[in-house]
Image (cartoon, grey):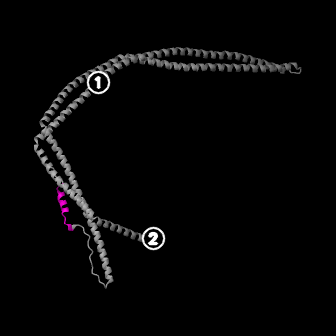
Amino acid sequence: MSRRERPGKGASFRSAQLLGADDGDQLRPQEDESLEEEPDAPQSRRASSRKRQERKKSSLFSDGLRAMRQVREASKQHADARNQLNELTKTIEADQAELTHRQKIEESFDSIIVQQQDIQDEARVALANISITQEQVQSEQDKLEAQLRAMKAEHEESLRPYRNLMEAAKGRSDDAARALADIRRAVKTADQQVADAAKRREQRIAAANKAVDNGQDRLRKVQSELDALQADPDSSPTAISKMQSELVAEQAHLDAARDEVKRATTESQQLVDNAQTHLWTQKQSQESLERQASEAKAEATQSREEYEGLYNAAMSQEKALSDQIEAKKKELQNAQKAADTAQDHIDEAQKALDEARHIHETPERTVELAQLVTENNQRLAGLKRDVNKLAQHEKTLRTRTRGQRIVLVLLVVLVVVVVAAVALLVATKGFTA
């Protein structure tokens, strides 16, 4: 197998470069340059002073930038070296874990082979026994399912006549109930007809009697007028004859009205009697249908209870068989779980055997890992030293350049403030104008 990539090779070289840099490259504040002054030229002295101030500001700014760059570079080198240290540490840990595992396997190789083969043998025996159990349970389940199908067919055949009787009795009960409801409506109608006939009888007889009373009144009036004419000697025979004819006509009307009272009484009473006879007939039919409906309902209840008893008994027998079938299914599920567990043991043991044989057959890989771990541990020690040096260098550089970096920040802030002030001034003048 090929060696793994060794991280961190460039860290020591870069750190050595940084740490071995010439002290002349470190930041030093630049000395002010002296200029010869001309005592006779004040203007020249002022110009020279401005130039010296500008060169001093430029030097401070450049020193600050250089300090910033050096600190950033030192920080980057330190971070890169630490990352390489972490990667190398993880690589060593992984290689050491693999080496330890291979050494442990190699030391216990013979016992591992025997142990895993014993596990496989036991699992295969258990698997064979489970297979036999599964076949037996499956056979028992098939028999129970066949019994259940036969039982359902038998129950269907035996229950069919009772179900037909129950349905027929229920049909008769429903028919009787509908007929009873119809006759009850008919009785109610007949009772209303009796009341209507009696009311019409009273109205007709009252009308006929009213006609008789009116006829008697008219007859008495005509008789009174005739008596007055006959008592008056001055009355003409023609008037008396006419009044007598009218009296005869009124008597005839009165006799006809009396005959109408008799006829109305007879006919109306006959209608009432007919309505009462019809009502009695309907009530007799209602009583008969009530008895029939009660008998049909009792018969339907008896048939239903008989069928339900037989049906519940049949369902109880079928449920007992169904429960046995479900128990067999549960046994098969448990057996399958046990078979899966045994097969898992066989597979896991085979995996352990394959790994142990592979490690035993590749001792060169173990040697290679041991050498690799030793070499990487040596590189790790050197890399740790480099990281510590880089950390110390970064800390020293930050301390030494702190003044230059602060000056740079202050200069930048000053420039920003000046620019903002100028912009504000220009804006204020523009607004005032």
Residue sitting at x 17%, y 46%: 96
Q: Is residue 1 visible?
A: no
Which of the two residues, 217 or 433, is positioned nearer the viewer here? 433
Decide: is 206 above or below 345. Answer: above
- What's the amino acid at mark 1? Ala
The location of residue 414, given as percent across then percent down, is: 35, 68
Q: Main secondary structure of the magenta part?
A: helix
Residue range corresponding to the magenta coloring = 8-24
Decide: is 89 above or below 280. Answer: below
Decide: is 86 above or below 257. Answer: below
The location of residue 171, given as percent across then percent down, is: 45, 19
Compared across the picture, whether 117 is left or right of 175 comes to: left
Compared across the picture, whether 268 is left or right of 372 comes to: right
Packing grade of label 2 (10 A; few <14, some 14-19, many >=20) is: few
| Label 2 sits on residue | 431
* Residue 140 found in image quarter: top left
Decide: is 407 above or below 207. Answer: below
**Cβ atoms under marks 2 and 1 closer than 8 Å:** no
Q: Is residue 294 visible?
A: yes
Which of the two residues, 255 or 418, is positioned nearer the viewer here? 418
Specify whether residue 400 is painted magenta: no
Q: Which structural element holds mark 1?
A: helix
Give the CA separation, mark 2 to mark 1: 97 Å
The location of residue 95, given as percent across then percent down, is: 17, 46
- What's the amino acid at mark 2? Phe
| Label 1 sits on residue | 327
> Is the C terminus in the top left, top right, bottom left or bottom right quadrant?
bottom left
Identity of the residue furthest to the right in this view: 233
